[in-house]
Amino acid sequence: MKQSSHAWHAQLSTVLEELGYKRSNADSSLFVHLGPKETLVVLIYVDDLIISGNNSEAISRLKATLQHHFPITDLGRLKYFLGIEMAASHKGLFLNQLKYVLDLLKDAEMMDAKPAPTPLDSKLQLAKNSEPLQSINHYQHHVGKLIYLTITRPDIAYVVSLVSQFMHAPTIFHLSIVKRILCYLKGSIGCGIVMAKNGHPQITKYNDSDHIELLHRLT
């Protein structure tokens, strides 16, 4: 039934709200509970749930409560979700999309491609007079997959944003850039993001001060 997922989400949301969870204004699938001794977070994706928090006993109680209302199976510690692999250690979390990259290379028939050292040639100049692609479906398909890959691969974020600007009118030149990205991924399949423990909830950011100064001058 097409409406079954909506009905499940609505019923589950009602139960969570009755338990004191508040729906996030930024994401309707995210519920947060702030207790005196614990903070719990529940993320819903279709019929899957991710539960996280700082109190294992509170998480166990929540699981028991949900199993009382719904036929839910506990799959244990999160290891793989939506194409993202997660490895936990005493240092923190390591997120990567290794299997996703392998599937992408197989789909593009580039498993035997020669690895490239960078996702984009530093001397590349955008070609203004390149032959349009006869079929853009192939281009859109792979660029769409690359966009999702940037979740754990910020090293390709710039070049992917570049090729995504030509989704509706790509040329052979643009396709060559996509192939270059795939060649780079071939040589860096196991790369990902490390979310290390820092002992505090503060967010740390880094920026290029020279770039900011230039922006101030331009404005």
Image (cartoon, helix red, strand yellow):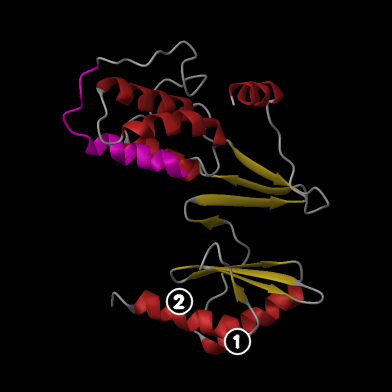
| Residue marked by disc 2 | 9
Badge 2 crowding class, 10 Å Cα cut-off, few under 14, some 14 to 19, many 20 or more, is some
Q: Main secondary structure of the magenta part?
A: helix
Counting from the top left corner in percent of width and height, residue 4 is at 35, 78
Left or right of residue 204, residue 43 in this image: left
Residue drawn where x is 60% and y is 87% of the image:
18
Residue 100 quadrant: top left
Q: Callout 2, which amino acid? A: His
Residue positioned most to the bottom: 68
Which sits earlier in the primary sequence, circle 1 or circle 2?
A: 2
Q: Closer to the camera, 141 or 76?
A: 141
Q: Callout 1, which amino acid? A: Glu
Residue positioned most to the top: 123
Left or right of residue 203, residue 64 in this image: left
Q: Quadrant of the C terminus?
A: top right
Residue drawn where x is 37% and y is 23% of the image:
177
| Residue marked by disc 1 | 18
Counting from the top left corner in percent of width and height, residue 47 is at 45, 72
Does residue 126 lie above or below 215 as drawn? above
Residue drawn where x is 69% and y is 82% of the image:
61
Counting from the top left corner in percent of width and height, residue 80 is at 54, 56
Range covered by the magenta-colored residues: 130-148
Q: Is residue 144 magenta?
A: yes
Does residue 190 appear in this view?
no
Residue 15 quadrant: bottom right
Does residue 167 lie above or below 117 as drawn? below
Badge 1 crowding class, 10 Å Cα cut-off, few under 14, some 14 to 19, many 20 or more, is few
